[in-house]
Image: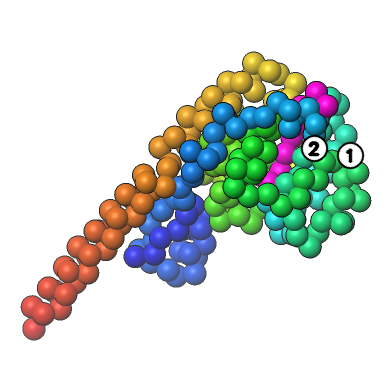
């Protein structure tokens, strides 16, 4: 049995001839990532009263962070970039109005995540996208590209929005829809939080044990068949 974290990964493995592929999602630390981490002083220091639209992740070409240029000058918002990587200096030039936090982990990362109003992820090559779950656990709605791992995580029009790959104007419109409507954003936030409450690491590791049990049953059956074959 081969375990994959998303339907996109499963489809890719099937295309390469891999058989007996099953879904096993990743868990999220709901104790660390939760809305209680929201820090109003941090928000004021970073945004000065503006809505915060944030990306968290590696600053590398495959993450397509440059697509966020359409969000760099949105009215009454500030783009926040959390992370580091080889594209950092290039992105600083492309996004002159953005606030670059740098690399964070642990409680500092959880505070930054929970202090956002909208989380954005433009990368089309994610096999899962763990930061989306961490945003949702922090009660932050998500706008993500409709390809790869995010397709399984974002229930469009309920806990966030998906946009067409390559359509950065649609990305911009989806973000504007949420930052400009407090009631809708609050509803999406509540649904985002509820979405991941059953995806703790304890829960997904219980699922992993079920997969092991199934694999052992199949293997035992195959052994019995091989020993009884003429």
**Outermost residue to the top:** 183
Q: Judge whether residue 176 can be spotted in this image.
A: no
Residue 92 image point, x, y percent = 87, 50
Q: Is residue 76 above or below residue 205?
A: above
Specify whether 169 is left or right of 130. right
Whether pointer 2 and pointer 1 mark residues with C-beta atoms closer than 8 Å, the reply is yes
Residue 102 image point, x, y percent = 76, 50
Q: Which residues are magenta?
A: 48-56
Specify whether 198 is left or right of 185. left
Specify whether 22 is left or right of 145. left
Residue 69 image point, x, y percent = 84, 43
**Residue bearing the label numbered 1:** 97
Q: Quadrant of the N terminus?
A: bottom left
Q: Secondary structure at mark 2?
A: strand
**Residue bearing the label numbered 2:** 79
Q: Is residue 138 above or below residue 128?
A: above
Q: Is residue 3 magenta?
A: no
Q: Residue at x 8, y 83 (%)?
A: 230
Taking depth in this image into account, of 153 and 229 the one nearest to the observer is 153
């Amino acid at each position: 049995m081969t375990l994959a974290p998303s339907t996109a990964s499963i489809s890719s493995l099937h295309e390469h001839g891999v058989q007996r592929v099953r879904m096993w999602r990743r868990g999220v630390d709901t104790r660390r990532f939760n809305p209680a981490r929201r820090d109003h002083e941090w928000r004021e220091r970073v945004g000065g009263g503006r809505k915060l639209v944030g990306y968290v992740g590696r600053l590398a070409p495959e993450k397509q962070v440059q697509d966020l240029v359409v969000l760099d000058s949105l009215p009454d918002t500030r783009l926040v970039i959390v992370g580091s990587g080889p594209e950092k200096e290039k992105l600083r030039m492309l996004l002159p109005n953005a606030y670059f936090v740098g690399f964070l982990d642990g409680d500092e990362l959880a505070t930054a995540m929970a202090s956002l109003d909208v989380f954005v992820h433009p990368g089309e090559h994610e096999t899962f996208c763990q930061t989306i779950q961490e945003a949702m656990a922090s009660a932050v709605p998500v706008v993500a590209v409709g390809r790869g791992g995010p397709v399984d995580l974002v229930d469009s029009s309920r806990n966030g929005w998906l946009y067409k790959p390559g359509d950065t104007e649609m990305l911009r419109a989806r973000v504007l829809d949420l930052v400009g409507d407090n009631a809708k954003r609050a509803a999406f936030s509540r649904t985002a939080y509820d979405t991941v409450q059953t995806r703790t690491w304890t829960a997904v590791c219980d699922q992993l044990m079920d997969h092991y049990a199934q694999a052992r049953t199949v293997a035992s059956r195959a052994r019995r068949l091989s020993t009884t074959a003429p």
